[in-house]
Amino acid sequence: MKRETLNVKRQMRCRSLGLFLLATCLILAAQPVLALKIVEPAEGAKLTAGKTVTTNVDLGKDSGIIQVRYYWYGEQDDTLVEQEDATAMGSIVAPVALIGLSDHHPAFGGPLLVPKDGIGPMRLLAVAEISRGRLGTRSVFDEIVVQVEPAATLTTIDFETDKPLQLGRAGQSSAFGHVDSLGKIFELPVVGEFTDGMTRRISSPASGTSYKSSNDKVIKVLKDGLLQIAGNGKASLTVTNRGKQAQLDVDVNVNDEPNEPPIADAGSNKTVKAGSKVKLSGLKSRDAEGEALYYSWSQVRGSKIPLLDVDNAEPSFLAPTVSEKRTYRFKLRVTDKKGADSVPAYVDVVVEP
């Protein structure tokens, strides 16, 4: 009898716990979006290049929105729009893919053309312009990453460079980033011709491209499709994508003074409050020979903000106004005096209201 009573009590506790968890889930699901959010297409959606999709946003608690502008970027593109551009003129460095207004269907959204030359991961950035009456306007944003795939078939791979590729020349003087030298990192401009007549850039491994060097002592293949000069001589680079291959002969003739490439360190991720002054730090970047470094910062995520002193070790910016947590990502490359480059380093800054 006691055992049966205990079993009944356990069942009641489990049932109560289940009801509690269900109620909690319903409450969380019912919570309204706090700020502008792209709800269509969905994060990670697979889209077809050249096709039209419907875009839709949830405005959340952001009121007074006049319009929402949409922009497409490659996942690692540096070109972004300015955060505080009230007129969508002047500071814009990317074409507007769509301007969503209140009378559109859906409101502030509508038909959006996926870039015809798109391939691989792409970012869709939505920037909403909010009226503040006599105070003018301010902007809020949201962005997602989607996967774009062409419906067409890849026919040939080509290189947008001289063939064979000549890197460096003996006896040249060294200067910041102006010469080919041991340790220098470069990207190979690779394009693909597709059956739909489009030429697409396929340099990034994210587009399906892989690289192989016939001589790692001359050209070394790094991650993210980056290549590095490792020594003098000749090598052949083989590029493969979607079952197609192409080769490029490379002849390297640089100053063979030993030099280890520097290492970039963009600092630790951080969370800051809107309106605060934020300082990035590349001071932990280092060079094996102890030489001075040249710094180059850029922004690769978030609606663009004015970044001061991008060529210094410690650039800064003013954290913009946000309605909800937003992530801004910055990229750092360093170069030593002999012209050797680092692999990029990244740092995320989360801005809170």
Image: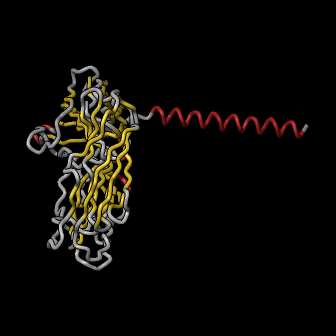
Name the residue furthest bottom: 290
State the image quarter where residue 5 is shown.
top right
Mark yes or no: residue 290 visible: yes
- Relative to residue 283, is residue 83 depicted above or below? above
Nearer to the camera, 66 or 47: 47
Point out residue 69 in the picture as x, y percentages from the top left corner: 21, 34
Residue 78 point in image, percent of width and height: 23, 49
- Does residue 297 lie above or below 33 as drawn? below
Q: Tell me the quarter of the picture where residue 25 sits.
A: top right
Q: Quadrant of residue 140?
A: top left
Q: How many marks?
A: 0
Percent position of residue 281, x then y: 28, 67
Rendering coords of residue 105 (x, y %): 27, 20
Residue at position x 23%, y 60% from top? 297
Of 275 and 171, nearer the camera is 171
In the foreground, 38 or 217: 217
**Whether residue 275 is situated above or below residue 282 in the rendered picture:** above
Query: Please, is residue 245 above or below residue 213 in the view?
Result: above
> Which residue is most to the right?
1
Q: Is residue 65 visible?
A: no
Q: Residue furthest left?
A: 90
Name the colouring of the figure. Answer: secondary structure
**Residue at 36% of width from left, 36% of height from top?**
146
Instruction: Give the quarter of the figure containing the N terminus.
Output: top right
